[in-house]
Image (tube, rainbow, N blue to C red):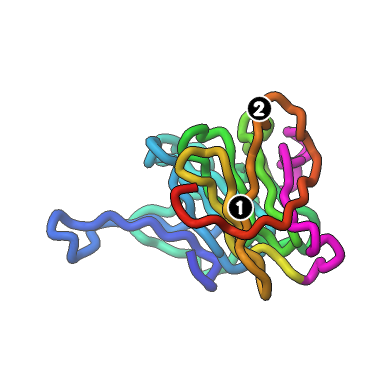
Amino acid sequence: GAMDSAVEVHTLADDLRSRVSGSVYHCHKAAVKYIEVEPFCPHNFFSVGEDGYVRQYDFRMKSLGCRLDNGATLGKVGCMYQSPNCLLKCKEKIKINSMKICATNTNLFVLATSENRVSVYDRRMLSISTPQTVNFHSSSGNPVVSFCPEHLLEKPSCYATYAEFSPCGKNILACFHSDHSYVFPLFDICNGGLSGSIVCSDETAAPFPW
């Protein structure tokens, strides 16, 4: 993923020095900010970008209509935009900066966006679709829970730059532009007690292990 809005997948030769094959995807209409490979399932990967979309790819499936083999490109940004591989669309004008999947529960993923919060989603509540219908086939794209440092609630310009789960999956580390890094406890979100809520905290990031 890069500023050219393309997602490229390359296969290296055994000597790891030369490329033997590749695929190019032109699903995004803006810069691709992050590529995430699903833990323990390397044929699944995801891309997020400044167009606010989470796109899902599966090497085992040939029916998504978004794959170009042998490294071919059509030379046009977003020429595969209508491909039915959209997992989530953020609100209008919201850009996505990073995505990380929880290693202890791969149904969960966290997004850092141009908002002043980070949000956790459950893939079981979402379904892949076209850009026009992506959030109509799920729970309206709502997060399970969102986290925001309390003092940033009134500072929407202080956006999240990165977020990830702790190795044990019980906490989230989040970094904010022009501010600090914070650790948020996930609690037991599987019970649904925090569904759709925004949890505020001003605890700064703790050193590893966390």
* Quarter assignment of residue 87: top right
Of all residues, the one furthest to the left in this rendering is 15
Please state which of residues 104 and 73 is positioned toward the viewer in this rendering.
104
Whole-number angstrom distance, CA of label 2 to CA of label 1: 19 Å
Q: Amino acid at mark 1?
A: Val
Please state which of residues 190 and 113 is positioned toward the viewer in this rendering.
190
Could you tell me which residue is drawn at 28 percent across and 56 percent down? 21
Where in the figure is residue 11, as x and y percent of width and height?
Answer: 28, 54
The residue range painted magenta reads 131-157
Where in the figure is residue 48, as x and y percent of width and height?
Answer: 58, 56
Please state which of residues 49 and 204 is positioned toward the viewer in this rendering.
204
Circle nearer the viewer, 2 or 1:
1
Q: What crowding class fits label 2: few (fewer than 14 Cα within 10 Å), some (14-19), or many (20 or more)?
A: few
Secondary structure under tag 2 reads helix
Q: Main secondary structure of the magenta part?
A: loop
Could you tell me which residue is drawn at 52 percent across and 39 percent down? 169
Q: What crowding class fits label 1: few (fewer than 14 Cα within 10 Å), some (14-19), or many (20 or more)?
A: many
| Mark with earlier residue (2, 1) | 1
Where in the figure is residue 50, as x and y percent of width and height?
Answer: 65, 64
Residue 79 visible in image: no
User: In this rendering, is residue 138 above or below 99?
Assistant: above
Residue 117 visible in image: yes
Could you tell me which residue is drawn at 50 percent across and 37 percent down? 63
Of all residues, the one furthest to the right in this rendering is 154
In the picture of the structure, the residue carrying the numbered disc 1 is 183
Of all residues, the one furthest to the top in this rendering is 191
In the picture of the structure, the residue carrying the numbered disc 2 is 190
Give residue 8's mark: none
Q: Amino acid at mark 2?
A: Cys
User: In this rendering, is residue 21 above or below 157?
Assistant: above
Secondary structure under tag 1 reads strand
In this image, 137 relative to 83: left or right? right
